[in-house]
Image (spheres, grey):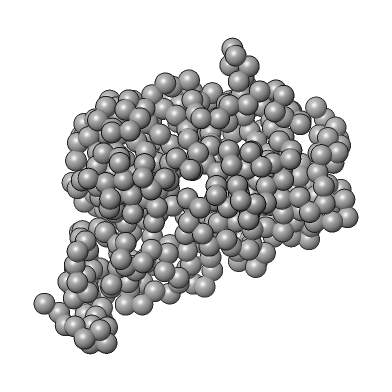
């Protein structure tokens, strides 16, 4: 289909005021999204369009497009940080696990869904390929479903498949899938990964966040046995563990023998591993982030990152320097699930400093993404602070002990002042 024909097809299906959804990160359907933004004035037909924004990998969305498009979403990750810096991204500060329900109840409108799908299997079923997440909920509410078929997208097992009749418009992809490559971990990441690997037991079920640090942790787990997977994001490190025989899912209490994820966020290696793999399945957010499912998962090790942690265990994962760069996301869902899982590990990992400034702080510079009542194990390159069941005095002491040495004296002073306000003192 020519570009002109695609634009004409979109124009016939879109209405002014429509809210559009598509897969975030590597699951973005580039042929459709670029046609949308490049022809936004014609497609808005004198009105405006709304776009729900997740984590970005491409440069498709740019601030100048706010002349016709209203951007709102749960995250300002990746290139979408520019939208937040320009003041054109309206943040929805909700838990990631709440997104499907908000869509189903109509509190988050979903008029049009744009998809990137795999070629159909022998039964004519199109796979969502790289992603389930919140898209199944949007599909159930959408008036219009439009998809591009990409031969490089893996056919993955999951809970949702589509047939040709489900699409109002089906086109061939004109771009290869987006890939997310990770740089080699540095000494700080390796030190943190070593601390976490020592905590994780054989047979544990893994949940990992996104970024270089979680990938470093996965690399440090190659000496383990029979690990399982139940995670939102799935990166190349998971494929490496599976190919090495470390990730077998054999001891999982739920979905035994099958790794569960919400989105594939990696390279061609990950796509090839997932293609037709009966030992892996994508599931929607209502399952991957479900509190009861997580609580019942065997030794769930939830490994997530943060921007900063204060001396009482409060965690900011959203704002740096006054700019929204992260998300409430699913970290709290998984931390709470791991805390309820028998033998679980609710872990938040972060380097002790960033550009010389301490990330263990007396007072957060942004919002409280995770309250101190849900803090579990905080890990930096200097060690592990286990905050579970600890009073404020011991929390302050343990967090200072894993801060960068050059910041500990000042944190000690601030810690004493903080504790005096609470009527407590160091032990």
Left or right for 160, reference 238: right
Residue 15 lies left or right of residue 308; in this view the side is right
- Front residue of this view, candidates 1 and 286: 286
Q: From the viewer's perspective, is 68 left or right of 80?
A: right
Task: Identify whether 199 is placed above or below 171.
Answer: below
Residue at image point 48% right, 35% down: 283
In this rendering, the answer to whether 84 lies above or below 397 is above
Residue at the extreme left: 427
Residue in view at x 27 percent, y 27 percent: 250
Q: Position of residue 183 (x, y in %)?
A: 41, 45
Point out the image quarter for the N terminus.
top right
Residue 378 image-quadrant placement: bottom left
Point out the residue furthest to the top here.
122
Q: From what the image shows, is residue 311 above or below residue 90?
A: below
Name above or below for residue 326 compared with residue 133: below
Residue drawn at point x = 54 percent, y = 56 percent: 75
What residue is rendered at 74% in x and 38% in y?
144
Q: Residue 331's x, y, as percent?
A: 40, 54
Which image quarter holds the C terminus?
Answer: bottom left
Residue 29 visible at all: no
Where is residue 398? Give x, y as percent.
Answer: 19, 68
Q: Is residue 291 visible?
A: yes
């Amino acid at each position: 289909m020519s570009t002109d024909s695609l634009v004409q097809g979109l124009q016939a299906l879109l209405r002014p005021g429509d809210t559009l959804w598509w897969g975030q990160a590597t699951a973005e359907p580039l042929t459709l999204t670029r046609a949308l933004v490049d022809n936004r004035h014609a497609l808005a037909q004198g009105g405006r369009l709304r776009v729900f924004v997740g984590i970005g990998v491409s440069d498709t969305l740019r601030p100048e497009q706010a002349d016709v498009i209203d951007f709102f979403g749960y995250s300002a990750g990746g290139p979408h940080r520019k939208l937040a810096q320009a003041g054109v991204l309206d943040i929805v500060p909700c838990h990631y696990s709440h997104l499907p329900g908000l869509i189903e109840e109509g509190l988050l409108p979903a008029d049009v869904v744009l998809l990137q799908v795999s070629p159909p299997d022998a039964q004519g079923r199109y796979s969502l390929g790289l992603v389930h997440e919140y898209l199944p909920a949007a599909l159930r509410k959408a008036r219009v479903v439009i998809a591009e078929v990409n031969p490089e997208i893996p056919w993955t097992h999951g809970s949702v498949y589509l047939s040709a009749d489900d699409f109002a418009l089906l086109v061939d992809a004109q771009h290869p899938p987006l890939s997310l490559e990770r740089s080699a971990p540095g000494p700080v990441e390796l030190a943190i990964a070593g601390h976490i690997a020592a905590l994780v037991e054989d047979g544990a079920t893994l949940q990992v966040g996104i970024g270089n640090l979680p990938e470093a942790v996965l690399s440090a787990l190659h000496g383990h046995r029979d690990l399982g997977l139940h995670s939102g994001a799935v990166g190349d490190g998971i494929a490496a563990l599976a190919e090495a025989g470390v990730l077998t899912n054999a001891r999982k209490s739920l979905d035994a023998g099958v790794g569960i994820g919400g989105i594939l966020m990696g390279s061609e290696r990950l796509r090839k591993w997932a293609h037709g793999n009966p030992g892996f399945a994508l599931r929607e957010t209502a399952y991957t982030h479900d509190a009861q499912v997580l609580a019942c998962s065997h030794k769930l090790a939830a490994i997530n990152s943060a921007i900063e942690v204060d001396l009482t265990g409060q965690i900011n994962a959203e704002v740096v320097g006054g700019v929204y760069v992260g998300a409430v996301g699913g970290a709290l869902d998984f931390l709470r699930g791991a805390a309820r899982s028998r033998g679980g590990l609710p872990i938040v990992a972060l380097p002790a400093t960033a550009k010389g400034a301490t990330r263990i702080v007396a007072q957060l510079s942004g919002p409280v993404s995770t309250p101190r009542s849900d803090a579990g194990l905080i890990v930096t390159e200097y060690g592990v602070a286990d905050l579970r069941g600890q009073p404020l005095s011991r929390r302050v002491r343990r967090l200072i002990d894993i801060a960068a040495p050059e910041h500990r004296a000042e944190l000690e002073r601030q810690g004493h002042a903080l504790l005096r306000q609470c009527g407590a003192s160091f032990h």
